[in-house]
Every structure is written in C-alpha cells, then in structure tokens.
C-alpha cells in the first residue's frame, strides 16, 4: 500500500479557523475524494503538539493500493484541480504545504478481541493468546523497522 501524505505546516490565521475548516470540508475534500484509485482519504486536524515550533494544523492522507495507482493519480487532472484549489487555502493559512509519498512496509494486524479472553475460551487458548500478545508487544517495542 502507498500513501500520499500532505503536511500543512504553519498556523491558521487568527479568527479564520471556521473559514479554514469550511474551505477544507466544502471545497478540498470533494476534490480529494475524486482522486483516481484512492482507497481512503483522511484529513486530520491538530489537537495538541509537543513542539510549539513545528505546528501541523492539518495532515492529509490518501491511500492507494499500489505504486501504479499512485502514479496514475499523480498524473490525473483531479490532482491539478486539487493543487489549484489548495492555493485558496492560503487565504486562511500561513505556512507551507509538502507531500511525500510513502510505502507501508510492515503492518501488524491484530485480531479483534484477543485480550481479555472471554469466559468461553479454554485455559489452553488463554495461554496461547497470552504468548501471542507478549510476542507482539516485544516485537513492537524492539524498534523493528520504525516501530516505537
């Protein structure tokens, strides 16, 4: 899976927070959702930041199934339309916008309801679930390929 991430670094102009949100919701999101081959379009708004010097009031993520789909989306007229519409956001936003493309390398998939075990599960199953969760936690905290 490939993801195109749009980082909006800077700040929303004072008094224009509602205008910023409305522009994203009414103008940009409909365009971004038309992107060819997009599996998922997500817009995240900053709630809190540890580093006041680097503020990201918004982050955009568009997921694609493979590199070919990403390349086709980047060459599409919808992208040109989106880039032009994004310029209108600078009326409410002071900062910069950059978009790296990333590839998902490792994905840990968890089965729902692994822990705590339900009363119907046998003690052997509980032991196996405990071992699997311990191994998964050890894998994630070991810093494997950028985890933790």
Image (cartoon, grey):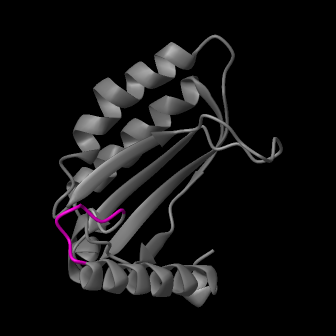
In screen coordinates, is 47 left or right of 86? right
Instruction: State the residue at coordinates (39%, 30%).
Output: 24
Q: Using the image, determine if residue 5 lies above or below residue 124.
A: above
Q: Using the image, determine if residue 42 lies above or below residue 106.
A: above
- Nearer to me, 18 or 106: 106
Give the image location of residue 98, x and y in percent.
56, 57
- Asked if the stretch drawn in magenta spans residue 119, the answer is yes
Instruction: State the residue at coordinates (20%, 71%).
Output: 121
Instruction: State the residue at coordinates (25%, 41%).
Output: 31
Q: Which residues are magenta?
A: 116-122
- Nearer to me, 130 or 33: 130
Give the image location of residue 48, x and y in percent.
67, 37
Q: Could you say which quadrant of the image residue 146 lies in?
A: bottom right
- Nearer to me, 47 or 26: 47
The secondary structure making up most of the magenta span is: loop
Instruction: State the residue at coordinates (46%, 82%).
Output: 136
- Nearer to me, 9 or 76: 9
In screen coordinates, is 80 left or right of 52? left
Q: Considering the image in quadrants, where does the N terminus appear? A: bottom left
Give the image location of residue 15, x and y in percent.
64, 10
Q: Is residue 67 visible?
A: no
Q: Could you say which quadrant of the image residue 138 lies in?
A: bottom right
């Amino acid at each position: 899976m490939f993801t195109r991430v749009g980082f909006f670094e800077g700040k929303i102009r004072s008094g224009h927070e509602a205008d910023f949100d409305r522009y994203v919701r009414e103008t940009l999101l409909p365009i971004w959702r038309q992107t060819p081959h997009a599996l998922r379009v997500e817009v995240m708004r900053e709630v809190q930041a540890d580093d006041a010097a680097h503020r990201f009031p918004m982050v955009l993520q568009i997921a694609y199934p493979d590199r070919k789909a990403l390349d086709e989306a980047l060459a599409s007229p919808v992208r040109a339309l989106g880039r032009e519409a994004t310029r209108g956001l600078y009326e409410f936003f002071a900062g910069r916008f950059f978009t790296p493309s990333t590839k998902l390398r490792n994905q840990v998939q968890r089965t729902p309801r692994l822990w705590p075990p339900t009363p119907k599960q046998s003690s052997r199953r509980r032991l196996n679930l405990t071992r699997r969760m311990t191994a998964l936690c050890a894998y994630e905290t070991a810093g494997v390929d950028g985890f933790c």
